[in-house]
Image (spheres, rainbow, N blue to C red):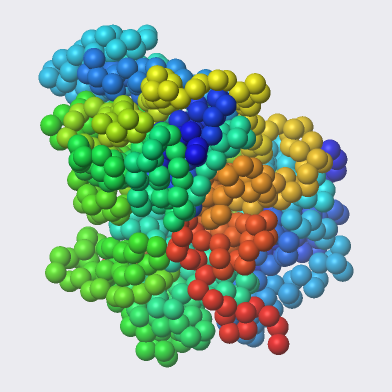
């Protein structure tokens, strides 16, 4: 068993890990290692063969593999070390990383700082308790995407999709292009959580009906799916009797949400936010464990990979600084969720560690128009930002300048969203 | 002519095949599905009952208490996940307090060891998450939890190692009485045998009637369950039962041997073969369970399933020789059937011996089995395992930490699986939070490779449960 000391070990070689590792190197870290469990870098981007990636970061439209490829191409020159097929089994608070691979056997690696970039996984049928039979033909959208885009296999011919998240929408188009008939996209909420451009380009362009405020109430089939029953739901999301529609289909795709994959974080003792299902992080993406950082979908689920890249660059930079200088310390401000706000990232700000401003990311709990985002402390509104349209499916960002920090009372600020007329 | 044909590869049939494989006889188990353990055995509460529930004097009472001790030994010998965690039956009012005392009396008569009636305070000390409404409870330390399908598989594998035969995909369609025995038609092939044991679960009435006068009818009674993520698996540390009442035996909450939390079942009569869950059934299970343990985090549910109890007109097991000499029923095996199976098997072997089956012991009976479970190994053991076989260094199922080595091992043991769920039952791959979303395709590839069949032919579970319907336009190949 070998024991090597790295400056930064990055766990996960998807978009988050790639950006974190390159940025750590750029910030001066000597030895940076990416541990990737698959046999290729790129993570979920490898199966996302549609375009639309990189509009913000590269100012052009790339496919998933192209987006990942731009980062992968820079690794060798930057001197980032990579281990593929390397599964991390355990991370301890002293930053010993237990990992293994077929070629290298069982490894205990030590690092001055660690960046957690494990991404997220899909919610399954069991997570939402869809009643009915349990035949073959029920897939999470991402699993179907893996079969089709990586393995080259079709998973069905007549499809009903539950959930209108982006992966579900993308798969509606993908299956249609491969000759399958997508009968319906069914969404529990009265609005879609997917990007508007995906609703237009993946459903409307192919005449696939979107049923808002509907859900699947029964899956029928002995061996393979034969039918699904869809019903309308009321404001409490309970099915309304008498509204059932039956679809003859052989496949159900589920796009019903993503869950950050934090098993390693939990084992390590990282504090997890029940709202995001991800680690509680400081302004520099450091978790509750000193020297352990996290970024990307393992912290909170992002809409666009470009934002994962930006967040992970901050994490990588901070990890390199920690490896060099140690913990920043200083007073801590807690960010609290006010009206209409589901969560914020970061949840904590070390004011002494902020250069000019801190970016606060959050999601709202419903669709709103003409709203004002307020950052307040001790009853006083410190900053306001107007928004014409807000939706849970669109991550919000506000920039909170350091100049306002002296006005913070009791070490707390609250982010809330109020109607324009109430903001005055 | 073989000595014995066992019909049905559930835990009863597999236990019996294992017990028979101790002797110098030829025994064949026939199972209609493509694997053993896939009926009621794979869809139940997975509890090793202590034995206070059945009425004294019943077959259930005797086999339960004996089986409780036998399962513990078997699981140790055959490397099957088992934990003796003890059980609590909760009372919520004076009437149920009396019932708890009655169960204690019954258990004492049945020979259940070390039971105690606990005060509410004692219950909360043992189980801080149990409801504050509890008034008393029956504690039975001999109760446990087990992996029922792994038990059945281990028993069948061991029997095969000792020379017994398992024929899968072999539904019994006819049984004829012939001179000196029976001709059993299974999977289109005739097997002549001296003895027949009918362990066909919910179909045991149909099998019985193939060569006997109608004597009983099996009514399928469905129980629906929630299986929750490991984050909920430590919510309780004992099997938490409710008092049996007019509306049924009550809903239990228990850790599983795999570290999850199981919650269920309800009890509704159903068509044989109907394993669907229902919105109402699941809502009932949820509501009832929260009476025992109010803070169950159902948002961490990872799967729902349903199983069928084989109820008959009689509130007891139906075990013994029928009017046809040489034909034995092991029928009406509902709860506590899993616990009782090893004991029933031993008793049926005794009956077969008395009926003329020569029970001469094998000289070399293989009575142990070891399975590599990578995630339970120490760091040093893991390093050694990978050095021995690099396939142990390749994780396939990331949620449950299952390696390719373990999957390949299972595919080369006696009675290899042929489906993704067959591998899941043996290795635990796909049993975790992502429910096989990430590892399913990889497991399918490994099965295809090891068994030398096209990937399209690897089913999810039973014959016909196809995962893949064909290739994409380019079949994943570059132009």
**A294, B295: nearer the viewer:** B295
Viewer can see residue A230: yes
Please say if B159 is above or below A55.
above
Report the label total: 0
Identify the residue shown where x is 50% and y is 73%: B469
Identify the residue shown where x is 52% and y is 43%: B166
**A403, A396: nearer the viewer:** A396
Query: In the image, A395: left or right of A331?
Result: left
Query: In the image, B223: left or right of A118?
Result: left
Please say if B19 is above or below B204.
above
Residue A145 position by quadrant: bottom right
Viewer can see residue A384: no
Query: In the image, B112: left or right of A83?
Result: left
Q: Quadrant of the C terminus of chain A?
A: bottom left
Please say if B139 is above or below A122.
above
Where in the figure is residue B364, as x and y percent of width and height? 66, 23
Where in the figure is residue B90, as x and y percent of width and height? 26, 23
Where in the figure is residue B460, as x and y percent of width and height? 49, 59
Identify the residue shown where x is 55% and y is 40%: B165
Q: Quadrant of the N terminus of chain A?
A: top right
Residue A185 position by quadrant: bottom left
**B421, A62: nearer the viewer:** B421
Residue A29 position by quadrant: bottom right
Where in the figure is residue B99, as x and y percent of width and height? 17, 18
Identify the residue shown where x is 76% and y is 70%: A72
């Amino acid at each position: 068993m070998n024991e090597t000391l790295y400056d930064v070990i990055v766990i996960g070689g998807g978009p988050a890990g790639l950006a974190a590792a390159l940025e750590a190197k750029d910030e001066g870290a000597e030895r940076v290692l990416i541990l990737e469990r698959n046999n290729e870098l790129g993570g979920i981007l490898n199966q996302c063969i549609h375009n639309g990636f990189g509009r913000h970061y590269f100012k052009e439209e790339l496919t998933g593999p192209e987006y990942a490829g731009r980062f992968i191409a820079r690794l060798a020159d930057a001197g980032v070390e990579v281990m593929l097929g390397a599964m991390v089994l355990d991370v301890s608070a002293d930053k010993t990383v237990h990992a293994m691979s077929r070629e290298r056997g069982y490894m205990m690696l030590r690092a001055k700082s660690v960046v957690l970039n494990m991404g997220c996984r899909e919610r399954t049928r069991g997570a939402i308790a869809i009643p009915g039979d349990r035949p073959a033909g029920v897939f999470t959208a991402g699993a179907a995407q893996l079969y089709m885009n990586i393995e080259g296999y079709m998973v069905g011919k007549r499809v009903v999709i539950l959930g209108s998240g982006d992966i579900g929408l993308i798969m509606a188009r993908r299956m249609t292009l491969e000759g399958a008939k997508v009968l319906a996209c069914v969404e529990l909420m009265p609005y879609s959580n997917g990007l508007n451009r995906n609703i237009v380009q993946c459903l409307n362009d192919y005449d696939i009906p979107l049923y808002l405020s509907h859900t699947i109430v029964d899956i029928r089939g002995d061996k393979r799916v034969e039918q699904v029953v869809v019903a309308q739901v009321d404001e409490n999301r309970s099915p309304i009797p008498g509204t059932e529609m039956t679809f003859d289909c052989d496949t159900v795709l589920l796009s019903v949400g993503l869950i950050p994959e934090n098993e390693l974080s939990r084992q390590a003792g990282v504090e997890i936010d029940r709202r995001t299902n991800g680690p509680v992080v400081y302004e520099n993406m450091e978790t509750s464990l000193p020297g352990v950082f996290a970024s990307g979908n393992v912290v909170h689920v992002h809409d666009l990979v470009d934002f994962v890249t930006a967040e992970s660059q901050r994490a990588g930079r901070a990890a390199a600084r920690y490896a060099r200088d140690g913990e920043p310390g200083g007073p801590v401000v807690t960010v609290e969720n006010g009206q209409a706000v589901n969560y914020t990232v970061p949840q904590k700000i070390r004011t002494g560690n902020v250069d000019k401003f801190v970016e606060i990311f959050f999601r709202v709990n419903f669709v709103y128009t003409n709203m004002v985002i307020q950052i307040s402390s001790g009853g006083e509104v410190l900053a306001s930002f107007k928004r014409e349209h807000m939706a849970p499916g669109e991550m919000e960002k506000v920039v909170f300048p350091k100049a306002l920090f002296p006005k913070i009372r009791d070490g707390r600020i609250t982010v809330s969203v109020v109607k324009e007329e109430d903001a005055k | 002519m073989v000595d014995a044909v066992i019909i049905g590869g559930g835990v009863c049939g597999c236990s019996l095949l294992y017990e028979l494989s101790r002797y110098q006889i030829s025994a064949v188990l026939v199972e209609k599905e493509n694997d053993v353990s896939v009926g009621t055995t794979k869809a139940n509460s997975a509890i090793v009952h202590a034995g206070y529930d059945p009425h004294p004097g019943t077959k259930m009472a005797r086999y339960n208490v004996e089986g409780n001790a036998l399962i513990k030994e078997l699981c140790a010998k055959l490397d099957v996940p088992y934990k003796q965690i003890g059980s609590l039956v909760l009372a919520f009012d004076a009437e149920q307090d009396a019932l708890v005392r009655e169960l204690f009396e019954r258990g004492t008569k049945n020979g259940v060891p070390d039971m105690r009636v606990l005060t509410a305070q004692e219950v909360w000390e043992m189980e801080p998450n149990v409801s504050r409404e509890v008034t008393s409870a029956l504690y039975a330390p001999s109760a446990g939890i087990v992996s029922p399908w792994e038990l059945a598989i281990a028993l069948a594998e061991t029997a095969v190692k000792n020379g017994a035969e398992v024929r899968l995909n072999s539904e019994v369609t006819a049984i004829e009485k012939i001179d000196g025995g029976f001709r059993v038609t299974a999977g289109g092939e005739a097997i002549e045998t001296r003895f027949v044991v009918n362990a066909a679960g919910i179909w045991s009435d149909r099998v019985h009637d193939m060569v006997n006068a109608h004597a009983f009818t099996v009514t399928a009674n469905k129980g629906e369950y929630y299986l929750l993520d490991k984050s909920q698996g430590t919510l309780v540390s004992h099997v938490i039962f409710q008092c049996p009442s007019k509306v049924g035996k009550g809903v239990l909450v228990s850790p599983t041997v795999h570290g999850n939390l199981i919650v269920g079942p309800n009890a509704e009569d159903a068509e044989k073969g109907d394993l669907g869950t229902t919105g109402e059934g699941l809502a009932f299970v949820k509501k009832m369970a929260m009476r025992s343990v109010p803070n169950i985090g159902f948002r961490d549910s990872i799967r729902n399933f349903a199983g069928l109890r084989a109820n008959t007109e009689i509130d007891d097991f139906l075990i013994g020789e029928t009017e046809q000499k040489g034909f034995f029923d092991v029928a009406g095996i509902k709860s506590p059937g899993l616990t009782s199976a090893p004991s029933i098997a031993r008793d049926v072997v005794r009956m077969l011996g008395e009926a003329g089956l020569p029970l001469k012991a094998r000289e070399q009976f293989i009575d142990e089995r070891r399975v590599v479970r990578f995630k339970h190994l120490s760091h040093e053991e893991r390093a050694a395992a990978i050095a021995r076989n690099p396939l142990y260094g390749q994780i396939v199922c990331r949620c449950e930490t299952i390696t390719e080595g373990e999957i390949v091992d299972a595919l080369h043991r006696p009675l290899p699986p042929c489906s993704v769920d067959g591998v899941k039952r043996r290795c635990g791959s796909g049993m975790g939070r992502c429910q096989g979303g990430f590892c399913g395709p990889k497991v399918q590839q490994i099965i295809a490779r090891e068994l030398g069949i096209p990937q399209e032919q690897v089913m999810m579970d039973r014959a016909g449960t196809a995962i893949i319907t064909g290739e994409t336009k380019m079949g994943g190949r570059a132009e």
